[in-house]
Image (cartoon, rainbow, N blue to C red):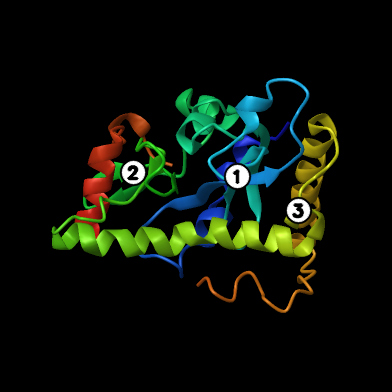
Amino acid sequence: MNIYISQKQWQKPASIGTFKDLSRLPNIVGAIDGTHKPINAPHEKAVDYFSHYRHHNFGIQAVADGDLLFLDFSAGYPGSMHDARILRNSSLYHKAEQGDILTGPIVNVNHHEIGPYLVGDSAYPISPWLQRPFPKATRDKSEIQFNPELSSARVKIECTFRGLKSRWRILQKRLDSDIKFSVPIAVACAVLHNVCIKIEDDCDDDSNPDHHCRDDNNGDVVRDGQEIRDILKEFL
């Protein structure tokens, strides 16, 4: 079960602008992460849904902007799947790899053309459209400086998940419905979350999810994820 966002939505400068005051890294369009939803053991392939949390659940992958709005939401993956594997099995991955999304706008960073990209944690693979932090053990000063700048933007997806679960309390407990019904429940909550954000209907929960979170010629655009990260590191 997936929520798809059109190519124009991904490339709106407005989404990039939501990260402007959160990080000095340029051209961030979204933050990606995953979460899990506890469920009863499915009737089929129950072992696939038994995760390292020691219970049955299904995986959710989502991308959010700096205003806590979901840009992409995908649910129903077996709980035993790692975040990187979920990514590779998602429509988001295939669209990005095929160049259907995350193609513009292009910005010049220290004389290099850089396209828009997502930021994620170390569980995700690095690519031209997805940046992750350097290893925590690094002693390189520029790499040490890079990591918190990425993290200050990436934390927004954590805040968005927190807001989703605070707004829709049904997601805070195990869903006892069949998985075929449980997955649409999660997706529906994400859709309604976006509606509430757009109409500025703040969550009533006292623990505000955001309280702890603060086109040119594409021929010369850098296409190597490692090189892009090094360029961004030097930019800082």
- Looking at the image, residue 142 lies above or below residue 1: below
Residue 194 visible in the shown view: no
**Could you tell me the amino acid type at mark 1?**
Ala
Residue picked out by circle 2: 114
Quadrant in which the N terminus is drawn: top right
* Residue 37 position within the rendered picture, expressed as x and y whole percent measured from the top left: 69, 45
54 displayed left or right of 168? left
Which residue is denoted by mark 3 in the rendering? 171
Q: Is residue 177 left or right of residue 10?
A: right
The local crowd at label 1, few if under 14, some if 14 to 19, many if 20 or more residues have their Cα within 10 Å, is many
Query: Dot 2: few (<14), some (14–19), or many (≥20) neighbours within 10 Å?
Result: many
- Comes first in the chain, label 3 or label 1: 1
Q: Marks 3 and 2, how far apart in space?
A: 38 Å
Q: Residues within 10 Å of mark 3 (few under 14, many from 20)?
A: some
Residue 24 location, x and y as percent? 35, 65
| Image quarter in which the C terminus is found | bottom left
Q: Quadrant of residue 175?
A: top right
Question: Nearer the viewer's eye, disc 3 or disc 2?
Answer: 3
- Report how far apart the C-alphas of labels 1 and 2 lie in the structure: 23 Å
What residue is disc 1 on?
62
Give the SS element for disc 1: strand
- Residue 25 placement: quadrant: bottom left
